[in-house]
Every structure is written in structure tokens, then in C-alpha cells.
Amino acid sequence: MLYAIAFSPWVLYAVIPAVWWQWSMLAALAISVAIFVSAVARRRPVAAMIIEIGSMVFFAAGTILALADPDTALHPYLPAISALWVGLIAWFSLLVRNPFTLGIAKLNQPPEVWRQPLFVRTNVIITAVWAICFTVGAVLLAACAAGGAGRGLVIVVQVAHFVVPMVFTFHYVAVIRKRVARMRAAAPTPPVYSGQYTGSR
């Protein structure tokens, strides 16, 4: 659910017709600001708001561009640039060893789990999948813009490069949870001290 909320401005921007791109930028900016303000009000840590902050920066710049130069030559390539932007955010979070999904995952886990190798490795893998999907999406969208592809194909690619990693995240987390449950079930049960002395003198 948190992923759907965090990326909702990008999905909104993707589905609004390109002829209204100035308003799609403005609407996406408004939603990203609202999501960020709500997250701050709930005292979420900065590490859990990497996407929200990146969204505000992109859509603020995009809104300024849209209002200042509605006929900019960059317009056809903005979907590719948007995918590249979130891809760079994901790759950078991996580079600094703070995967953006890790901050989100910590919101639903107790502090004693945060430094466990499996927990960290799981989020590194998930973030890497998001980063790869964003990068592939950027390449495909750039190709669509260069080749003059129809709006329908562009929307499909834009939505897909969010939906695919989101589905992977839910599936992979479910697999890891089952693996942890099996490991706990297979672990030997430590003896319980009854408080009674049964040895011989």
C-alpha cells in the first residue's frame, strides 16, 4: 500500500493525456506535496520518504518548465526523463547502502529486525529490481519518443515499469516470510528450566 501511495503521482502523470501535460505536472506536484506533508505529520523518517522527496523535486521542476515553455522540445521525452529520474534515485540509494525500500520496510518491522542480514539483503534485491525496471522503462520510453510511438504504448510502458516491480515486491516479500516461518519451525526448541533439581547428590 505504501508503494502505491508513494508512486501515485507518477501514475497520475502517466495516464493524463499528453495534451494536458502542464496540468498533469501540476496535479502530480500537488499530490506529491500532499503525500509528503502527510508523511511528515506522521513523523516518518527521511529514509522512508526518499521517493516522496524525489517526486516533489521532479514535478516542481516539471511544472516550472511546463508553465514557462509549454512547447518545449523536451516534452516528448519527459516520460523517459521521469523514469530515468526515479531510476537514478533507486540506484543512488543502493550506492549509499540505504535502499529506498529499506526505509519503507522498517515502518512495518520492529527495530531488532532492521539490521538482520536477511532483512537488509531482501531490500537490496527489491530495490535493485525497481532500479532495473525504471532504467529499462526509461530506455523504452526514449525509444518510443524517438520513434513517434502512439500515446497508448507510452502509457503501457509507463504503468508497466511501476506495476512489474510492485508485483515482484509483494511476491518476493511473501516468499521470504514463508522461508523465515519454515526456519523458525525447524529450529530446535530450547529446554525449559522448571526450577526443580533432578540431579543426584
Image (cartoon, grey):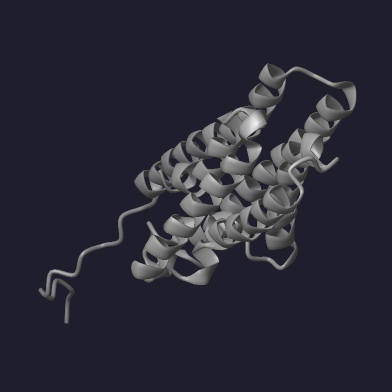
Look at the image and tell me in which quarter the N terminus lies: top left
Q: Is residue 171 left or right of residue 140?
A: left
Q: In this view, does 182 lie to the left or right of 130?
A: left
Q: Residue placed at 48% from the left, 65% from the top?
A: 114
Using the rendered image of the protein, determine whether residue 172 is visible from the camera's viewpoint.
yes
The answer to which of 159 and 31 lies nearer the viewer is 31
- Does 103 appear above or below 86? below
Residue 54 found in image quarter: bottom right
Residue 19 position within the rendered picture, expressed as x and y whole percent measured from the top left: 66, 29
The answer to which of 104 and 153 lies nearer the viewer is 153
Look at the image and tell me in which quarter the C terminus lies: bottom left
Q: In this view, does 159 lie to the left or right of 153?
A: left
- Does 12 appear above or below 44? above
Residue 150 position within the rendered picture, expressed as x and y whole percent measured from the top left: 75, 17
The answer to which of 8 and 98 lies nearer the viewer is 8
Residue 166 found in image quarter: top right
Q: Which residue, as the protein is rendered here, is positioned at the far left? A: 196
The answer to which of 27 and 143 lies nearer the viewer is 27
Residue 136 position within the rendered picture, expressed as x and y whole percent measured from the top left: 78, 35
Q: Residue placed at 41% from the left, 69% from the top?
A: 40
Residue 82 position within the rendered picture, expressed as x and y whole percent measured from the top left: 71, 45
Q: Residue placed at 64% from the left, 37% from the top?
A: 21
Using the rendered image of the protein, determine whether residue 116 is visible from the camera's viewpoint.
no
Q: Is residue 32 left or right of residue 110?
A: right
Q: Which residue, as the protein is rendered here, is positioned at the far bottom? A: 201
Task: Give the mark count.
Answer: 0
- Does 125 appear above or below 57? above
